[in-house]
Amino acid sequence: MKISFYNLCSLLFFFEVVVYAQDPFLEIRPFAQPSFEQFSSRNHVDHHYPSSNIQDGFFLRFDGKEFDNDVIFPDCLSGSSCYDGHAGTDYYMPLNTPILAPAGGYVLWAAFSPPADPCPGGIEPNGDQGTIIVAHGNGYFSCYLHMNPPLNVSVGETVITGDTLGFNGNSGCALNAHLHFEVRKENWYFDTNEPWAINPFGWWGETTDPIEQVRGNRSEWLWVSNELVDDGDNGFQRYYGPDWTYLNTGYQDDSWRVPAVYSVDNSRHYAIWVPTLDVEGEYDIQVFLPENPNAATSAKYEIIVQNEDGTNSKSIIIVDQSLGLGSFSTITTLNLPKGSKSSVILRDHVSTTSVGEYVLFDAIKFVNTNLDIAKEKPIPKSFKIFKPFPNPFNPSISFHYEIFISSDIKIDIYNISGEKIDSYYLQKIHPGLHKFNWIAQSASGNSIPSGIYFFTFESSDYVHSEKLIFIK
Ligand SMILES: [Zn+2]
């Protein structure tokens, strides 16, 4: 199976899950039912100089916003996401949240070693730093810092999307539990003068990305999304602010709300939507506005389009969010390039004439105006496969899958040496939700040893593979 970084790249964090991938373990954690959490990111990549050892008092964020005041953590203004000389993105989350591989790759580094000396911001190091680096085989390397022991992978191991790499912590140069997630391109080495870091959330400032000027590596949005981007999707990123409120209304019954502010200096909350568009063309940009009588009457949607030369063009559309009736409405029509080269950024900062206490964050849809109604209908994916459960397992494991078109299915189970040990051929499975259950034994009914197994789920146009851990 060919694994592309782009189509598998979804950064997922399981909350309170435990997955053991190798033997022996330093610590056994109790198994808990996984639930997905999306953590907002708090500190960004400093595009101006992404080097933790050299600070120059100037910070440049993904959206081109500049800070030159109190730019070293922890003195930065709450929610402003400044951090001079930062090469990654920080996600604050409870200690020991499992960190999953965002894409398949090879574990290049997994160890506890002395952190940067001195630590950025002059903080005291908290022991050796747990660091994992995964090479994705396409020029990109993802790095995970401040991990807690035990690391769940070791050097030389191959991981697939969703494997638990380890658990977040506060080891090394960290004051509290968080994940420092960093992406490097072309070289994994941390060069303090000309860092290899890029920003996986792209560069949306108006000038050329300064990181590109240093190395020639352009910061790109690496998460594949859809034409419809809702909160929680790969194309959506919510950034830290102290006053996010989750609402049970809106598209798919969820949305977010923050207090509207009138001064840029007080702006703390912002989010970005990045669609992946199949074709270049004219698009209606439609925002979903949940019913909310207290919504801002002049919310500012910034629509940014990346040009070939690395510069970006921006249009600002003022939207009366109080007119929302629980539906999508077109706010503008623009020519957009193919791929993930356009974005919408919405902030808590509203026009001075705005009335209404809150800015609302919900789904945004990009509708190609040249496509006819028939083409506009979503083409159903032939499958949806849910995570096998429980994993690790003994003696049986099961997973649900949903089929949208009647199909034959082949399921094979392999051991770690690649030998097929069991196989199922299911004919003409009807559309709907189905469950597959497997008991750990060979096709002939013999018992099998503890360890790692793989199953592949295959139809005429789809292959999915998953790692299983059998513990006796
Ligand atoms: Zn960090």
Image: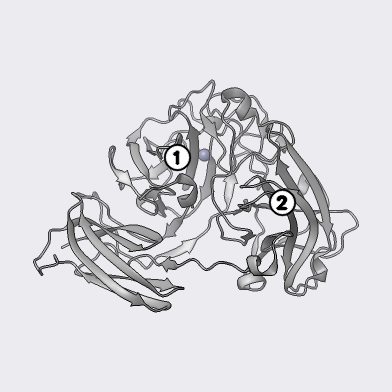
Amino acid on which disc 2 is placed: Gly
Q: Is residue 301 visible?
A: no
- The residue located at (28%, 42%) in the rendering is 157
The quarter of the picture where residue 250 lies is: bottom right
Q: Which numbered marker is on residue 281?
A: 2
123 and 397: which is toward the camera: 397
Relative placement, left or right, of 305 versus 235 is right
135 and 38: which is toward the camera: 135
Instruction: Note whether 438 is above or below 193 in the view shown.
Output: below
Relative placement, left or right, of 193 versus 305 is left
60 and 115: which is toward the camera: 60
Q: Is residue 93 visible?
A: yes
Relative placement, left or right, of 402 versus 273 is left
Q: x, y percentage for residue 12?
A: 46, 55
Q: x, y percentage for residue 243?
A: 67, 58
The residues tagged by marks 1 and 2 sit, at their Cα atoms, a distance apart of: 33 Å
Q: Which numbered marker is on residue 142?
A: 1
Q: x, y percentage for residue 172?
A: 42, 36
Q: Residue furthest right?
A: 353
Q: x, y percentage for residue 191?
A: 48, 23
The quarter of the picture where residue 408 lies is: bottom left
What crowding class fits label 1: few (fewer than 14 Cα within 10 Å), some (14-19), or many (20 or more)?
Answer: many
Amino acid on which disc 1 is placed: Ser
Instruction: Note whether 185 is above or below 265 in the view shown.
Output: above
- The residue located at (80%, 73%) in the rendering is 293
